[in-house]
Structure formats: structure tokens, C-alpha cells
Amino acid sequence: MSFLSDALARVSPSPTIAVTQKAMELKAAGKDVIGLGAGEPDFDTPDNIKAAAIAAIEAGKTKYTQVDGIPEVKQAICDKFKRENGLDYAPSQVTVSSGGKQVLFNALVATLNPGDEVIIPAPYWVSYPDMVKLGGGTPVVVETTLENGFRLTPEALEAAITPKTKWFIFNSPSNPTGAGYGHNQLKALTDVLMRNPHVWVMTDDMYEHLAFDGFQFCTPAQVEPGLYDRTLTVNGVSKAYAMTGWRIGYAAGPEQLIGAMRKVQSQSTSNPCSISQWATVEALNGPQDFLTERCDAFRKRRDLVVAGLNACDGVTCAVPEGAFYVYPSIAGCIGKTSAGGTLIDTDEAFATALLEEQGVAVVFGAAFGLSPYFRVSYATSDAVLEDACARIKSFCAGLT
Ligand code: PLP
């Protein structure tokens, strides 16, 4: 009898760990390494949010709270959904967890049975397939293409649906591509879902506020109100408010689903951090103008990185609508050999050689389910990005 669970055996170790570990080893050995792997903003949490947390501590708001959120934070979330997305939710339809990650995990664990299928467009955020497997379900990965802007087509969605499909996981703007779906592109997908009433939508709107060039963010229940009763709208404060370490994510959806998720949470973490919940009340109710400033900084960096990568031999980089990632293709590099003598037969080989020979750490595409690509997180300074692009250019120029 195995000591470890069958559920764990279904989950693969994170393929990103090998690159991260290698980067750490090289750094420890004194090598000058640029990390473009981190999925978090380099900006600090705004001062008004920090002050709200300090005030919460001083007021003794340091005890257990309601399982899935204090009434004040639930109300702030209802107000946010109304104000920004035109969605009406009551506090009883809202859940708050320790990060968007826990929200998604709770929802999948609360609903999946063996054999249930979950449609996940690729490239995807690394955790979706493994969370589905942990919950006992089967991920059904549907690839998108660079030519389609990494957006799932309605035909591909329709073809992936079977009688066993329980969820469709939707993420716009996307990690790892930054691709965003405009109203009509999303409506084409929700039309497919309207024809398939057994399929629920889990929409991961984590990068809602990181959108550029006038891209109008929209979310499924807003675009198609007919989906309201089978949509879980997931969001959080990690990315927009630079609060990755505070661990607060939230969602709204049908009461029965929210109740089931509460049950999972009550037997795991009990409640999200009380202090972080008060900080989130301030994040959502307080001034939002800093978002424009930060988006502007991210857009400039995006432009710098896209231009820098497109100047590299064998690399093609699309211009994404949002988030802080780009996902360049290295189709033109495959089959070549690096200056250091490594055969670049996969995107993993590319990322490893790039790290070893030029000291630039990126995450290879296979980790996100679509090759041959790599992901760059450009949430770092212009100077670092310029240096990184110069190194990638020199690496590509050395391929023969
Ligand atoms: N969803 C996506 C697409 C993400 O990129 C991340 C974080 O990287 C999360 C969810 C989870 O965010 P958190 O748990 O910090 O709220």
C-alpha cells in the first residue's frame, strides 16, 4: 500500500520548478541572472491599503472571521461587481479565500466527480489542469494558436464539449499570453455555452485591471446574462493592487455553489486572513486612480519587450491586450544549436540554454501546454528588460 494518496499521484510536479531551481543555483554561484519568471507586479501595495491593515491590527481585528469573508468585504465585493462589471450579486453569493488560487481550488473540489471533464484552453495558467486532477476530474486541453491571438475559437470550444463536460475555465486577459477577449469574441463563446446548458463557466478575471490600448475588459455573465446561474466569476486583489502576499481572492456565483465552497474552506483554512480582508475593503472601496498610472508603466514595458523580442532571430512575439506577460514563439529556433553547443529541440532546451549561456530565466511553453514558446513576465524595470532583450538577442544570434 502506497503511503502517498492516489490523488497526489495524478498531479505532476511543477515543470517551472526546474528552471527556477537552476536560476537559484546559478545566482548562488555568483552568476549574474535576470529573472523574468515571477508572476507578480514589482510595484508596492498602495499606502492607503497598508494603512487599513495597520488600523485593523491596532483595532484588534486579529481573530477568526466568518468562514468565507467578513460582511464588510463581501459588501465591497458586491459593490465592485456592480460598479465595474454591471453584475448584481448579494453578499450570500460571494466567497472570499486565501487567494484566487484557493477560490478556484474550492470550486473544483466542491463540484468534480470522477469522469467530469473540464475544458481548459492552452496555453493555460499552470495550476488549472493539476487542480482539476486533484479534484478527481479530467482536464480537456484545447489548444489555441498564435495566429488567432491565442484566443479559443467558438468551433474549438463546441468540438471539445461532451455530455461529461462540467466546467469551461476562461481566463482573459490571460496568463501566460496576455491575450484578452473583446465583447464579440467572448459573445461567440457564450453563444456556444447557451447551446450547451449543462456546462458551467469558471471565469478567472484576475488580470481585469491590467489592460492596454483601450481594451475593454468583459466577463461572461456580463456579456451573456443567460449564463448568470451557471457562472462563477473569480477575481482577486493580488495583481491589480500588488497584493500577492496578502492572499485574498474572491468569487461570486449561485448560492448553492458558494455554500459548497464554504464547506470545503471550513475544513481547510477556516477563513482568509482577517487583516488582509480589511485591507481588501480599502483596496476595493478606496481610490483607484493609481491603476491607470501602473497600467501605463506596464504598457510601455510591454512595447519595449515586444519590440526587443521581435528583433531576435527566430522569435515572433504577438502584442497582447493585457496582464504583464508576453508569449513569444521560438518556432524559428527549433532544430538549431546554441553557441554553447546545446541542441534546441524543445522550448525547455531553449530556456535551459538561455539561462546557462546568457543568465536569463524565462519559463518554457510546455509548462503552459503550448510549444514551442516561452513566457516572459515584464513586471520589472525598463533597464532590466533592455538588458534581458539584449541577452536574448545575442543568444538567438548565436544559434546555428
Ligand atoms: N489566476 C491566474 C490566471 C493567475 O495568474 C494567478 C496567479 O498567478 C492566480 C489565478 C492566483 O492568484 P492569487 O492566488 O495570488 O490570487
Image (cartoon, grey):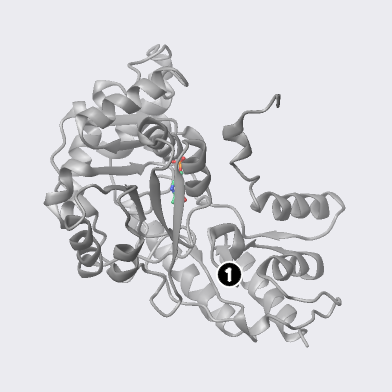
Q: Which of 111 and 188 is in front in this view?
A: 111
| Residue located at (33% from left, 65% from top) | 159
Assign the N terminus to one quadrant of the image. top right
Q: In the rendered image of this protein, does residue 57 appear above or below residue 359?
A: above
Q: Position of residue 204 (x, y in %)?
A: 36, 49
Q: Is residue 247 visible?
A: yes
Image-based side of 346 in relation to 381, left or right? right
| Residue located at (72% from left, 82% from top) | 335
Q: Where is residue 240 in the image (x, y as percent from the top left)?
A: 39, 49
Image-based side of 189 in relation to 312, left or right? left
Quadrant of residue 57 in the image?
A: top left
Q: Position of residue 18 (x, y in %)?
A: 73, 52
Q: Nearer the viewer, residue 49 or 36?
A: 36
Image-based side of 339 in relation to 158, left or right? right
Assign the C terminus to one quadrant of the image. bottom right
Q: Can residue 68 be seen in this view?
A: no
Q: In the rendered image of this protein, does residue 265 appear above or below residue 155?
A: above
**Judging from the image, what secondary structure is the residue with disc 1 in?**
loop
Q: Name the residue under label 1.
A: 371
- Classify mark 1: residues with Cα within 10 Å, few (<14), some (14-19) or many (20+): some
Q: In the rendered image of this protein, does residue 70 appear above or below residue 175?
A: above
Q: In the rendered image of this protein, does residue 108 appear above or below residue 140?
A: above
Q: Where is residue 162 in the image (x, y as percent from the top left)?
A: 32, 55
